[in-house]
Amino acid sequence: MLRAALLIASATAAGAAFAQPALMFEVDDPVLLPGESTTVRLFAGFDPRDFAIAGVATSVFASGGGWSDLSLIAPMDGPGTSTGAASGSGIDGILAGQLNFPATGGIYADDTNPIAFWQATYTADVVTDPTIVDIRTETTRYDVYIERQSAQSESRLDELIEGAATIEVIPAPASAVVLAGGMLALRRRR
């Protein structure tokens, strides 16, 4: 029941229109057993008065777990971008952006709002008690294109709502551990 409620809330948030700039996480499976993995995506939303996201520089912080398969999502994987690097505290230095050069070649930015720009696989640590993993962003750049017919961008960092999400890690039930231990003992006897 909790898993279904979290999934519905996540899907609803991903489709919502933004009244101001905001980063948002989407977690495919927000309830994991130790060692299980899920895909985590980041979306950037902007005020509808602006045209599109130009660039985002952020880091993702998470308590515990491991990150792999870092990637940017097109078209936010333009020149000079970076998926970031996994560290002990999460992912440092994500840099995503797209081009908008209508006058010189008819290249228009994708104006999807919110727009997915980054994803990675999160694998839960082994835990003995139920654990909540807090995930959050810390952003240093958040620029938007102000209109379709211009390459001019403006910062919306001062108005930004940072992203936050949680993943719940639930240890295997004690009975499953005892059963697994019993099966191992039977194998050793043979």
Image: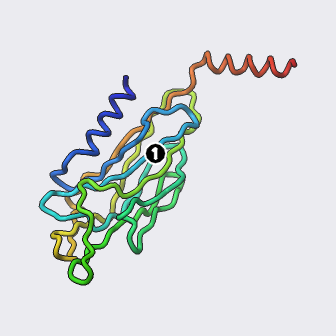
Q: Quadrant of the N terminus?
A: top left
Tag 1's secondary structure? strand
Q: Quadrant of the C terminus?
A: top right
- Give x and y (percent) for residue 182: 74, 16
When asked about the image quadrant of residue 168, the answer is: top left
In the image, farthest residue toward the left: 49
Residue beneath label 1, please?
39
- Give x and y (percent) for residue 81: 41, 69
When asked about the image quadrant of residue 102, the answer is: bottom left
In the image, farthest residue toward the bottom: 104
Amino acid type, residue under disc 1 in the picture: Thr
Q: Is residue 130 above or below residue 107?
A: above
Q: How many marks?
A: 1
The front one of 81 and 113 is 113
Q: Is residue 136 above or below residue 97?
A: above
Q: Which residue is pictured at 27% across the width and 68% down the height?
A: 54
The front one of 180 and 75 is 75
Q: Which residue is pictured at 44% across the width and 37% down the height?
A: 29
Q: Is residue 131 above or below residue 85?
A: above
Q: Badge 1 local density, few (<14 within 10 Å), some, or many (20+)? A: some
Q: Which residue is pictured at 33% across the width and 64% down the height?
A: 56
Q: Which residue is pictured at 46% across the width and 62% down the height?
A: 83
